[in-house]
Structure formats: C-alpha cells, structure tokens
Amino acid sequence: MTTLTNEPTEVYPCLGYSQSAGRQPPTIGMTFMRMPRTVPGQEDSGQETSGQETSGPRAARSGMTGAATTGSGAAGSGAAGGRLRNAARRGSRLILAARRHWLFSILLLAGLVLRVLAQLAYRPALLYIDSVKYLYNGWPGTDPVGYKVPLKVILLFGNLETVAAVQHLLGLAMAVTIYAMLLRRGAPRWLAALAVAPVLLDAYQLQIEQTIMPDVWFEGVIVAGLGLLLWRPRPSLWLTVAAGLALGASATIRQIGEILVLPALIYLLIVAGGWRRAVVGATALCAAFAVPILLYCGIAYAATGHFRLSRSGATSGVYGRMGEAADCATLKLPAYERGLCPTARQKALGPDGLEHSENSPLSLYVAPSGHSRSHYVSSFNRAVLTQQPLSVLSSVASDAAKLFAVKRATSPGDTPIWRWQFQDNYPTYGQAISLSPAHVIVVGLKNQLAGGGYRYQPLDPSMGGSATIVPALANFLRHYQLEGGFTPGPVYLLAVIAGLIGSVSVARRGRGAAERQLALACLLFFSSAAAVLIASDVFEFSWRYQLPALVTLPPAGALGIAVIISAVKRRRNGPPGQDAPGQVSELTAPAR
C-alpha cells in the first residue's frame, strides 16, 4: 500500500527519480555499502574478480602502483574530457534556450545578418556632416560631444570600421536587454520578441549604426538607464544611482537627454513605497543624473571658458520653431526685433533652415549697437510663445504626428530623409564630406576665424582612408529600406494607444502584483518615449530624432498589451487571488 506524504522532495535528475527529504533513495532490492575510492583514470568494473582483494593494505598498494604508472596520462585525458563535457553542457543549454525563445532567436539572427551586410557594404563606415564634430572638433560648442569618449577609446584599438562594428553590436545588445527586461516583468515571450523586432530590423537603425554619429549611443544609455530602474520592482539605492548616471550621460551625447530625469523621477516616486524612500531615491537619482552633466560642463569650462553643454540653447535654441510658428502680422514686437520675423519664403525653410540657413533672419539679423544679439532672439522667442501659444502647439503637434505616417517622406522644411537612407554609392555632403578621384574620403573643416572658409584634408589613413562599397549589398540594403524595411507609423500608433492604456492602469486598484509590475514598466517606457520625442519635436522634426522611438515605444506597447491581456484574464477568472507559485518570484523579491 502506498502512503502519500506532504514532505518536500529532492530531485535527482541524473537518476530519474525524486526522494522525500530525510529518506534514502529507493534501492530496488539492493543494499548500499561503502565502495573503495578509485584512482583517476581507472574504472570500477562493478564486479569482484575471483581472488582479487578489494580492501586493505595490499589493495591500497596496488592502487598506488596503478596511479604511479598511469597518473600523468589519466590526469591529462580527464581534464580534456571535463572540458569537452562542459562545452557539451553549455551547447545543450544554448540550444535549449534557442528553442524556448525561438521567435526572438530568429529575429536576433536576422538582425545580425543585416548588420553584417551593412558592415560589408560601406567601408570603413558612413560619414555625415556632423561626423566632423566628433572626429576633428568641427563647429566647437554647437552640440555636446560626449560621443567622443567611446569614439576615441575604440579608435585606440581600431579604425572607423571597428567603430561601426561596435555600434552594430550595441544595437544587438539593446535588443537583448529590452527582451530580458520585458520577460523579467512578466510579458509573454512572443510579445517581448515582437517588441524588439523594430530595433533589430529597422533599416534606419542599421544605417545610423553604420554611421559615425552619436545616436546609437544615445539609445544605448537610455536602454541602460531604464533597464537598471526596472531590474527590481523597487530599485535599490545603487541601482538608482547607476540609472541616474546612465541617463545623465545621455545629456552629454544629445542635450535633449536632460528631459529623461522627469519620467525616471516619476517612476521612482510611485514605486518607492513610502515618503522616506521616495525622498532618498529621488535625491540619489537627481544627484547621480547631475554628475555626468557637471563633469562635462567642468571640462568644457577648463577648455573654452564656458560652463555649458552647448551654446545652442543659450543663443537661438528654439528660434527655428518659433519663427516657423509666428504670425508676424499680429505679433506685437519692438521695431528693433522686427528683423527676426521671417517672410513667407523664409518660413518655407522650416525650423532647421531657420536655425542654420544663411538666408534665415537669424543669420541676417544685426542687433542694435552695443546690445547682444542673443538677448533679442530670446525676447522674440518669448513673444511668440506667450502671444501665440496655440500656433506653437499646432506646429509641434503637426510635426509629432509625422511619426505615425504609413510611409517615410520629407515634408517641406524638414531635413531631407535621404540623409538617413542607404545609397547606391558612398554618400557625400558638399564641402563637408567628399571623395577624391582615388576614392579617398576628404573632410572639409570650416575655418572659424578666417572668414568661414573651408580647408580640406584627407581622412587620416589610420581611420580607414579610402571609401569602398559593395554595389550588390548596397543596392539590396537600399531596396530593403525603401520597400518596407522600416517600422511603419501605424505600428507606432498602436504602441502609443496600448502604452497609454497600460500606463493609466497604474492608478487602478484590484490588480495582482504581476499586472502591476507590467503597468509600472509600461509607464516608464511610455513616459520616457513621450518626453524625449516631444521635446525633440519642440525644436525641429527630423527622422533621425525619431530613432529613440525604436527602443521605447514598441516595448511600451508590448507591456500595455500584456496589461490588457492580464486584465481580460482576471475578469474572466474572477477576482484575483494570490499569484501562482513562481509567477513573479523575481519581481516580488525585496530590493537589497
């Protein structure tokens, strides 16, 4: 008769059975006895040979003799066998993980193949007009140049081709990190895999990874900061500090990163679990966020005498947006500021053109004698914002809505989209980036002191020197990008709707711990996406500035859908009880 017990059991996977705690495993009619130790390399036959001693001094001397004669060879073969067994076990675990996460594995492999093709198609890497800022300190002070740090470190060990390879690996690493975060928060594997498909397969992401530009690093520190905050349901102090440092570093790469402290702060205040923890966490986050910015500004002050991330925000900043939105016929301005009002023809330049074109009022304006031009530009911006706020909001909203378009196109006044598309040849940019007859990359450096003329020099041979392309691969990548190899606007729109629903559900009660963790993660991703994308659109619209959507909106949408699925199941199954054992075991563990 079999007796059932409630005692815990121990599992012996290698033997194929389990054992109740404190009991001997079944022997099936056998009795256990202490067996003699065998020398490495010898095998026990499992039987006693007639006349052979199995214990005592003689057996010991016999074992020692065998060890002496076969010791070195047996040890070597044993070590080699151990390495092979370990390798086989690791391979088995990898295959098992790939089968379990088959959809993500397929997408990751596809992303890797596309990145290899981009790496081979354009060598040593793609350059853009702004690449000169980071390679040769062109136009100093116009933007933060924190990108120089990883760039210079990589160039110590390789060339621009190495930089592009590292940036491609960073793109893959972001996908792996986001996938792990979503799984850790309780999202289904299929949803988590679909959430990282855009960053793995979007051709605009591939193109920027192949280009010597800071955008992929900006995305990377955003993902790192969000990942650190989400790793535990209530981040510990050191995780909070690390997240603050990562998000603060984003502002030294692109100044718009300054806005990211707000969604991180809101998230911390919600999950703190008490006002004391909230105060400590918020203080730690803000202090850590400020460290990279203050360090960068301190270095800038020592080098240039200006304690700032860049001079753009201090002089013009949002003039392009305000000039494009202004209705100068009804705008009340002093006579000496009227010169900043753009004509209809100048408005056609768009925010970017109004900021940088030589035909912009910003370039042509001459301030009254003895007065600062930046003072009058700031006054003009303030007048437009306060007198015509609806016009400014309409202009920003119109640009923000472009993200949801079915196709990618250039609207009048926007930065041309072809700059972020693969080309059939090696792309050049007027005087800034050109090619010699021998296909050597020539960089044009604008002289800031001698009338603004250009001086030209070939790209340092140590960086790669000559430009080469593989036409067949370049043609394939271009057609892939133009014929659907990008994240369509309706996908972003779906992500926004689902992310908004998931974020709002944080305020709802009657949910289990697992659903709450999904909603909180959704809130952080969604608010970060909204902050960085809308803040960018306030200044100007560029498809390049929409790239952070790839690493924020799809994860927010996936988490929102997971919240909706969880809510539907909860309503179908009645009021929530306790979570199933192991359902959120990692998430509900207390922070240390």
Image: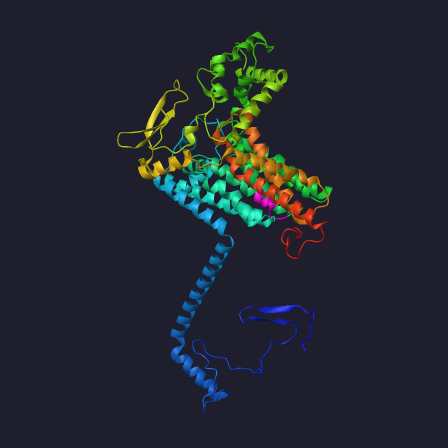
Q: Residue furthest top?
A: 335
Q: Residue at x 73, y 43 (%)?
A: 509
Q: Residue furthest front?
A: 572
In the depicted view, which residue is nearer to us: 5 or 258?
Answer: 5
Residue located 49% across and 40% down the image: 198
Q: In the rendered image, is residue 439 in sight?
A: yes
Q: Based on the picture, tell me whether residue 248 belongs to the magenta stretch.
A: no
Using the rendered view, name the quadrant where residue 464 is placed: top left
Q: Is the residue 365 above or below the residue 189 in the image?
A: above
Residue 100 place in picture, x, y as percent: 51, 55
By secondary structure, the bulk of the magenta-drawn segment is best described as: helix
Residue 279 in sight in this render: no
Query: Camera-side residue: 274 or 498?
Result: 498
Looking at the picture, does residue 506 appear above or below residue 137? below
Horizontally, is 383 left or right of 125 in the view? right
Residue 506 at what x, y percent from top left?
68, 41
Q: Splitting the image into 4 quarters, where does residue 458 fall?
A: top left
The residues colored magenta run: 226-232
| Residue 394 place in picture, x, y as percent | 58, 21
Determine whether 215 is above or below 358 in the image. Answer: below
Q: In this view of the protein, which residue sits in the foreground, 73 or 92?
A: 92
Residue located at (54% from left, 29% from top): 536
